[in-house]
Image (spheres, rainbow, N blue to C red):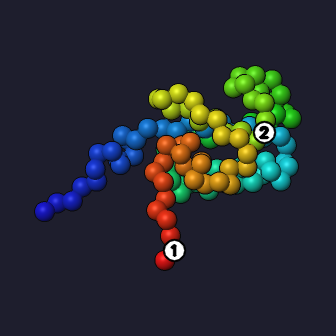
């Protein structure tokens, strides 16, 4: 019996995630947000996402484009619309929901 990958998991069939992370310089909170989103994306979406990091100190006019009022803010775009996640993205469960990823199974006893 030949085993093949389900069609939904083939890389060319998956939806591409378009992400824009707004930060304010190289503050600890901004740097944590960058590290957290890169870690999650590489673990879960490797090869299927585009991440743009926008430093509002360098490009303040970009805040109006996505109506950014706090930083760091991650804006995700998918076929279902846009989602905004505010903070350093350390709450992985919330980031997973925002990216449309399945919840992690609980670990422990």
Q: Residue furthest front?
A: 109
x and y percentages locating residue 102 in the rendered image: 45, 51
Q: Is residue 42 left or right of residue 10?
A: right
Q: Identify the image quadrant of residue 68.
A: top right
The residue that label 2 is drawn on is 71
Is any part of residue 47 visible from this angle? no
Q: Is residue 95 left or right of residue 64?
A: left
The residue that label 1 is drawn on is 108
Secondary element at tag 2: loop
* Residue at horizontal 53 percent and vertical 57 percent from the top: 43
Is any part of residue 66 visible from this angle? yes
Quadrant where the N terminus sits is: bottom left
Q: Front-most of 95 and 8? A: 95
* Residue at horizontal 50 percent and vertical 70 percent from the top: 107
* Residue at horizontal 54 percent and vertical 49 percent from the top: 96
x and y percentages locating residue 61 in the rendered image: 80, 23
């Amino acid at each position: 019996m030949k085993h093949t990958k389900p069609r939904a998991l083939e890389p060319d069939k998956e939806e591409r995630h378009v992400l824009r992370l707004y930060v304010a310089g190289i503050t600890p909170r901004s740097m944590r947000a960058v590290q957290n989103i890169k870690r999650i994306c590489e673990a879960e979406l490797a090869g299927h996402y585009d991440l743009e990091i926008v430093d509002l100190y360098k490009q303040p006019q970009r805040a109006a484009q996505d109506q950014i009022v706090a930083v760091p803010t991650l804006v995700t775009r998918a076929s279902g619309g846009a989602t905004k996640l505010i903070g350093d993205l350390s709450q992985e469960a919330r980031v997973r929901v925002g990216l449309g990823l399945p919840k992690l199974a609980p670990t422990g006893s």
